[in-house]
Image (cartoon, rainbow, N blue to C red):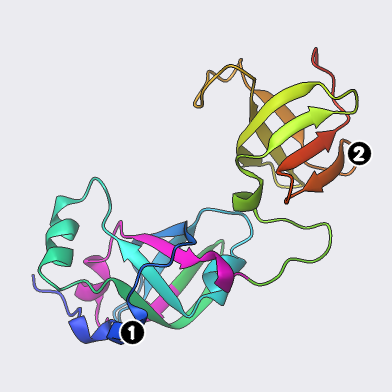
């Protein structure tokens, strides 16, 4: 089955350079409907990074050789212009320029979506993007080092910091990492410039 993905869907050559601050924000799951729309999986509970970017930089799925071939053949442009994106039920659906039918959308299955960090909307005071928290050092009120944020968990009501203890390298076993709720009751301060989070949390918790 041929796919209706036109190389002209890529933006102009002056806009094709991969941004130095590119962040992987999601993945295309599957086709949705018959007019080229597709389902998107956001990598954060807050999908504003996907919604705010008017162009998505894309790479083929690591486990989808056929998609990689499509990229090299020029059938998948390195940048997709977002025409529309909206919430649909518990997920997200979108359409991009140059993809006009279901087979074209199916050809995008598994494609990884990146956006420039500079395109993210400015968060409200006291709010942070997950990507900005990963890699930050975590210390408690006593100045004791708890480790480095390796990821976050979305529990619904709030997020939880996943912290890799000092001397260990992520990924670690579940019983080795520290889990600290990212809520005001436990988080005293987030200093992005100093790349440090101060928490009210003991070493023996």
- Horizontal side of 62 relative to 171 (left or right) equals left
Q: What span is in magenta? A: 94-120
Height in image: 11 above or below 154? below
Q: Residues within 10 Å of mark 2 (few under 14, many from 20)?
A: few
Which quarter of the figure is the C terminus placed in? Answer: top right
The residue most toward the front is: 194
**Which residue is found at the position 21% from the left and 71% from the top?**
76
Instruction: Answer whether residue 103 is magenta in the image.
Output: yes
Q: How many marks?
A: 2
Q: Nearer the viewer, residue 96 or 126?
A: 126
* Snapshot quadrant of residue 199: top right
Q: Position of residue 124 (x, y in %)?
A: 79, 66
Q: Name the element at disc 1.
A: helix
The residue most toward the top is: 204
Q: In the rendered image, is residue 186 in sight? A: yes
The image's mark for residue 166 is none
Q: Residues within 10 Å of mark 1 (few under 14, many from 20)?
A: few
Q: Position of residue 1 (x, y in %)?
A: 8, 70
Q: In the rendered image, is residue 100 in sight? A: no
Residue linked to disc 1: 14
């Amino acid at each position: 089955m041929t796919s209706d993905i036109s190389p002209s869907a890529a933006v102009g050559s002056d806009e094709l350079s991969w941004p130095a601050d590119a962040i992987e924000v999601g993945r295309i799951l599957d086709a949705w409907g018959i007019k080229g729309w597709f389902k998107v999986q956001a990598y954060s509970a807050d999908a504003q990074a996907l919604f705010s970017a008017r162009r998505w930089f894309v790479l083929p799925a690591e486990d989808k050789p056929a998609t990689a071939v499509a990229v090299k053949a020029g059938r998948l442009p390195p940048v997709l212009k977002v025409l529309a994106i909206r919430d649909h039920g518990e997920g997200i659906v979108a359409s991009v320029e140059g993809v006009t039918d279901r087979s074209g959308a199916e050809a995008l299955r598994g494609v990884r979506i990146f956006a420039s960090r500079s395109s993210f909307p400015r968060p409200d005071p006291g709010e942070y993007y997950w990507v900005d928290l990963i890699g930050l050092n975590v210390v408690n009120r006593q100045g004791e080092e708890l480790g480095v944020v390796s990821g976050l968990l979305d529990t619904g009501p709030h997020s939880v910091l996943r912290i890799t203890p000092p001397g260990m390298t992520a990924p670690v076993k579940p019983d080795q990492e520290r889990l600290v709720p990212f809520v005001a009751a436990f988080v005293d301060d987030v200093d992005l410039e100093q790349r440090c989070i101060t928490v009210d949390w003991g070493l023996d918790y």
